Image (cartoon, helix red, strand yellow):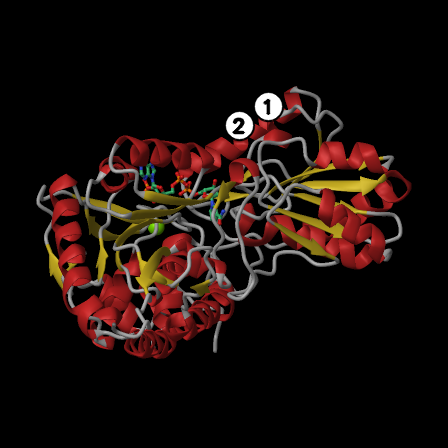
Amino acid sequence: MAFNMSEAELKDSTRAFLDSGPKQLFINNGWVAPQSGEYFASLNPASGKPLAEIALANEADVDAAVAAARAAFKGHWSQKFLAGDRAALLFKLADLIDAHADTLAELETLDNGKPYRVSRKGDLPYVTKHLRYQAGWADKIEGSTVPVTFPNQFVYTRREPLGVVAAIIPWNFPLLMAIWKLGPALTAGNTLILKPAEQTPLSALYLADLVAEAGFPPGVVNILTGPGLPTGAALAAHMDIDKLAFTGSTAVGAKIMEAAARSNLKRVSLELGGKSPNVIFADADIPAAVRGAQWAVFSTAGQECVAGSRIFVERAIYNEALDALKGHVEKMQVNHGFAEKVHVGPIITEAQMKRIQGYVTDGQKAGAEIISGGAAIKDLGDGYFFEPTIFAYQDDSLPLVQEEIFGPVAAVTAFDDWDELIQRANSTMYGLAAGVWTRDIAKGHNYAHQVQAGTVWINGYGMIDPAAPFGGYKMSGFGREMGKESIELYTQVKTVWVNTYQDTSKPE
Ligand code: NAP
Ligand code: MG
């Protein structure tokens, strides 16, 4: 498998997909033009050039997709497809994704910018691992029998699907985020409307044909492209959507919750942003910890919700660790995703790059010290590239320490004692993830118990597994994806009471 290639060497299937004209909306297993007649361009962030024209779904298209999903839920999907049948379709879809993995990975790199090696060897295998794990749940979703205080009552519970689920996802792991929602939603017997991010719709649109090929009945999976306004907002406010699963920023998550409350109280689960602390104690394996901290913040160019963007180093080893981190970071190669040597790809959009630059400029003005990087890279063409950047700071109130930058920027600080560390680590509104590096296992566990985060890694960072629950504390959201918790997120419990009283007295 070659990872260094030019775009001229794309697979024929990738080229054919890109060249096949404007991309339409996927409703009822077919492609339909948007009712507004409007299209927008998806750009390649490595070049700034358009890749394809994409349909823009408005409220009327959302209505059509909801009608399709509702009809499928009431009809074939719930009547004829038993748990094992749903699993079989999901396994078939996973096989098809594997068979098309090269093309999907190429589309992911073109649309999102991430290194092709990462798309092909990271995202794609993980997509199908996740789908197969979820498919395995289909025939294991059980209820229980309940020992109530009333006599002669047989009480049992059923776990039933919610109905029509809408999923709104971000651009950083486009296909993976799609499958994180599609897998448990369909496994549990719901139907789905997926809205990919406007910056990265291509892999989801390619997936649509695989959904139809796998044999899912029409209307079970519908894909609507378009921006937050109007497409996402129309989904959030719709009266006939039963659940909205969202991954994205905290600000938009709050808007979605509000829209859900003002419409039909649809269920909401939110996977939101983070500003995750990664702690290196003096007793850690320092080279491993520094390497771990480097990748925790700079992989995917820092555009990861779990990015370990606040690095706390115990003062005794602060200078040593900071020097080592700087040494590693300065060897990182920033380049386009198909280049032979690339560790860090482009930033998703020009606007996002300007935002990152803003944090860097303001951080310097406010007294934080740049240890490495700090500037946009101009000699890689018209794409959006930014140097991996390290800041040293003391003041926890700085915006660059409090706010999610979603770019390749690490903020490093020294700490002296335990209480100070716990207070500072927990001092943002976020609580998605945390890391800690120490050889003292008791210290590691105690830190894990005191830090406010949905996931904690001790002597590691960034692993997310289909079997391990994942989600946020505080303003990083609520609801847990992965593991059996993901099934709870896409089902509701019904309690059934059966009167078993029998008159056993002898007739007079
Ligand atoms: P975003 O701006 O919140 O967008 C996420 C999705 O919401 C996109 O599909 C977006 O549409 C849509 N959207 C925007 N405004 C909307 C509205 N008013 N109503 C309904 N939908 C709306 O986030 P992003 O910039 O794409 O992604 C980065 C963020 O996602 C970061 O904050 C990151 O931490 C978070 N994230 C969290 C996790 C996690 O698991 N916790 C994982 C990955 C990313 P368009 O973009 O198409 O306009
Ligand atoms: Mg794009």
Mark 2 residue crowding within 10 angstroms, few (<14) / some (14–19) / many (20+): few
Instruction: Determine whether the beta carbon of the residue marked 1 sits less than 8 angstroms from the nearest atom of ligand 1.
Output: no
Residue reaching furthest to the front: 508
Residue type at numbered disc 2: Gly
Residue 178 to residue 239: above or below:
below
Q: Which residue is mark 2?
A: 358
Residue 84 picture location, percent across and down = 32, 78
Residue type at numbered disc 1: Asp
Give the secondary structure at mark 2.
helix
The answer to whether any part of residue 54 appears in the image is yes
The quadrant in which the C terminus is found is bottom left
The answer to whether any part of residue 203 appears in the image is no
Residue 317 to residue 92: above or below:
above
Residue drawn 49% across the image and 52% down it: 480
Left or right of 115? Residue 330 is right
- Label for residue 234? none
Residue 294 picture location, percent across and down = 68, 51
Q: Are marks 2 and 1 in contact (CB under 8 Å)?
A: yes
- In the rendered picture of this protein, how many numbered marks are placed on residues? 2
Q: Nearer the viewer, residue 144 or 324?
A: 144
Q: Nearer the viewer, residue 200 or 435?
A: 435
Gap between marks 2 and 1 measured at Cα = 6 Å
Ligand 1: give its quadrant: top left
Left or right of 348? Residue 57 is left
Residue drawn 15% across the image and 40% down it: 59
Residue 221 picture location, percent across and down = 23, 61
Mark 1 residue crowding within 10 angstroms, few (<14) / some (14–19) / many (20+): some
Give the secondary structure at mark 1.
helix
Q: Which residue is mark 1?
A: 362
Residue 105 picture location, percent across and down = 40, 66
Left or right of 33? Residue 436 is right
Residue 69 to residue 431: above or below:
below
